[in-house]
Image (cartoon, helix red, strand yellow):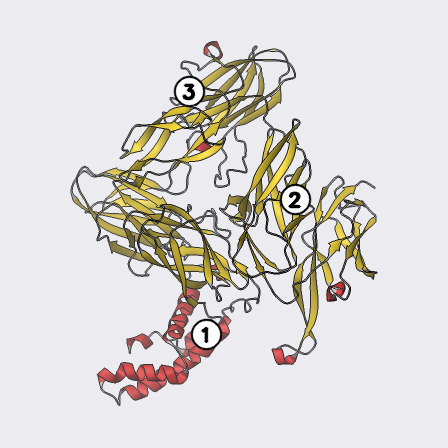
Amino acid sequence: MNALRWKLSAGLAALLAAVPGAPAQQPQFTPPHLGYLYPAGGRQGATVEVTAGGQFLRAVTSVHVWGNGLQVTVGKYAKPLNAEEYFRLQEKLKGLRERFQAERAMVPPGRARAVYQRLLRELGVTEDDVEAVRKFVAERTDPKRQFNFQIAETVVLQIKIDPKATPGEREMRLITPAGLSNPLRFHVGRLPECRKSGSDAVSETEVREPLPIVLNGQILPGGADRFAFPAHKGSRLVAVASARDLIPYLADAVPGWFQASLTLYDAEGNEVAYAEDYRFQPDPVLYYEVPVDGRYVLEIKDAMYRGRQDFVYRVTLGEVPFVTDVFPLGARRGAGATVELMGWNLPLETLTLDASHKEPGIHPLSVLDAEQIVNRVPFACDALPECFDQEENDGPDKAQQVDPPVIVNGRIDRPGDWDVFRFEGRAGSDVVAEVYARRLGSPMDSLLRLTDDAGQLLMVNDDHEDKAAALLTHQADSRLSLSLPATGTYYLHLGDTQRKGGTEYAYRLRIGPPRPDFELRVVPSSINARAGTNVPITVYALRRDGFDGDITLELKDAPYGFALDAGVLPADQDNVRLTLAVPPTGGGEPISLSLQGRALIGGRKVERAAVPAEDMIQAFAYHHLVPARQWLISVHNRRWANVWWKLASEDRVTLRAGSKATVRFLVPRGAMLGQAQLTLNDPPEGIAIESRSPVRNGVNVVLRADPAKAKSGLVGNLILDASMERHVGAAQGKPPGTKQRIPIGSLPAIPFQIVGP
């Protein structure tokens, strides 16, 4: 049997004896982690077999989907072997090989397969075990492979897509008895789909269906996937890759995502087009006008020759419409707008928009072509008056007069061009000038300079970070904010830092007084909690134009039993940790929650909904708040569930540097948790638990602030985690007397402030 020829020899087994095993058996209550979906999309009306890769996936029971038209069935689970499992199976396979070789000579050739199957059954080995051993060897002996336990487990999903399902993005989370996974994107489209042939690192697939089509694959280490297709003279081919769009950030990879590249070859193997990105966006887009009929090959690979299972891609290929630019980049709320469209294979050149019902912010803009969605581009909506820049206005002597507050829609028309705007200001008045270009899809890398009537430079800015733009890793939009020193005429100079220009270098420039405001993000977007406990969450404030006040946080229309503890985001702070109280009973489907923040700004009440987000790490170091569609919680009924502790007082605890403060928790009579161990959950530097002691109907916790480390003036919340210890006996495979700590849950958040000694 050829299937047995690759079995490991004793020498290879000795070589692999030094290979470290897998992590310890998964904790009983560890929620699943979802690393990738492959393929990451499908066509209307199709049933797609999708591999979900991640960790702690053994007990996946169902899938939660945001969006309509999908029915998901959970199938086969697989996980990698650890070293101990490998050696146990390898010994069985060694015996299998010896017995098979002995018996094969005694039966006709046609009976060899039946003998092999009988021996598998007798030895308690399956074909899946044989494949698992093969994968173990491949993953640990191939120096190119980057084995990662966080994506090593898989579960197969059968996804049935309704023929009338709305095209676009879905959000999927796996569900186990331990709770919800993080969300990942799955796309529904109208085009035929093709999957790469085979599992080799380098492969070529013949595209059998006519274009346009969506190509799906995974890039393995050093790999390249090639798709061959016929193309006719005059065709205007567009290839649009989605890779980073599917998985925005990889925590353990540099630069932090799958950096796809596209190469197009003609029938002779000559490279005729290449793309490694699209302007400032990592996912490449390629355009090519076909000069002659022939067979063409599109290749996709990682630009740095990396690869693994979560290097998943989708490439739309064909004479598809693609919008490269629009102008203007936005419109005034309540008004209509005529938008110029530029790009490839577009069905129209202008689009008339009705912005009467759009809220201020950035919205996706798209058009239809024969029921096919042109790619979406960002389009801004604002309440301020608007105008267009008027050339020639490239110097103070030709400056365009504007009357703030106003938004100017313009272009840096040619390389080296400057647009200069003149406005009148009063001494002491606050002025903000902010560019929206890169955030709206423009390649412009803006530079803002403010001068007075004498030409003296007052302020300059190149890049300003907007934490709401979580997918922009080069924040290239400029912003100025200052109090004017005198009454008179001022000049704003706007150009491109790299001295580039053209019709695509569009911008929106806001000039006017500050508009204090805020946005909110709540992390994580998937919460898993035991019934009757408290669970830590973090709320981030993205403050605008100098707003630095308190923000009161509250749940909106939450089911009975849910509540926020210590729900205030303090003034001058960008984030706060607090706890979400969970009702005493759980079970059932995940529950969608909503959180909002209230603040007084300029004497008026402002309310903003919190956007759920994932705190994603890029390249080991950088954090990004990537928005999700829903804020979901899964509540479980489990042992140690009733962590009913309550703060005796809701007043803010004052910690004086170098001294102590006592916090009292009320505990139900007879509750075992009165003896629970308490630890601080990620506390600020310099704060520690000094002691704890039982009192009547409660527990006193003494906190101490180190005078050398505690930061005076810090305001926030402290979170305590409760746990119990138990002795693990020899019957459980542990030495007698071994202690195991069992997490129970978190206590209500403690509001605190640190003051000087």
In the rendered image, residue 323, in percent from the top left (x then y), is placed at 33, 34
The location of residue 561, given as percent across then percent down, is: 64, 53
Quadrant location of the C terminus in the rendered image: top right
Who comes first in sequence, dot 3 or dot 2? 3
Give the residue displayed 47% in from the left and 12% down from the top: 399
Q: Earlier in the sequence, mark 2 or mark 1?
A: 1
Quarter containing the N terminus: bottom left
* Observer-nearest of 65 and 289: 65
Crowding around mark 2 (Cα neighbors within 10 Å: few <14, some 14 to 19, many 20+) is many
Q: Amino acid at mark 3?
A: Asp
Residue matched to label 3 = 417
Kindly identify which residue carries mark 1. Answer: 86
SS under mark 1:
helix
**Marks 3 and 2: which is nearer the front?**
2
Residue 739 is at least partly visible in this image: yes
Q: Amino acid at mark 2?
A: Val
Q: Which residue is mark 2?
A: 576
Mark 2 vs mark 1: give the one in front: 2
Q: Residue furthest bottom?
A: 106
Q: Where does residue 433 sit, x and y in percent of width and height?
A: 54, 23
Which percent across, then down, holds residue 475? 50, 35
Relative to the observer, which residue lies in front, 535 or 35? 535
What element does badge 2 sit on? strand
Proximity of marks 3 and 1: CB atoms separated by less than 8 Å: no
Amino acid type, residue under disc 1 in the picture: Tyr
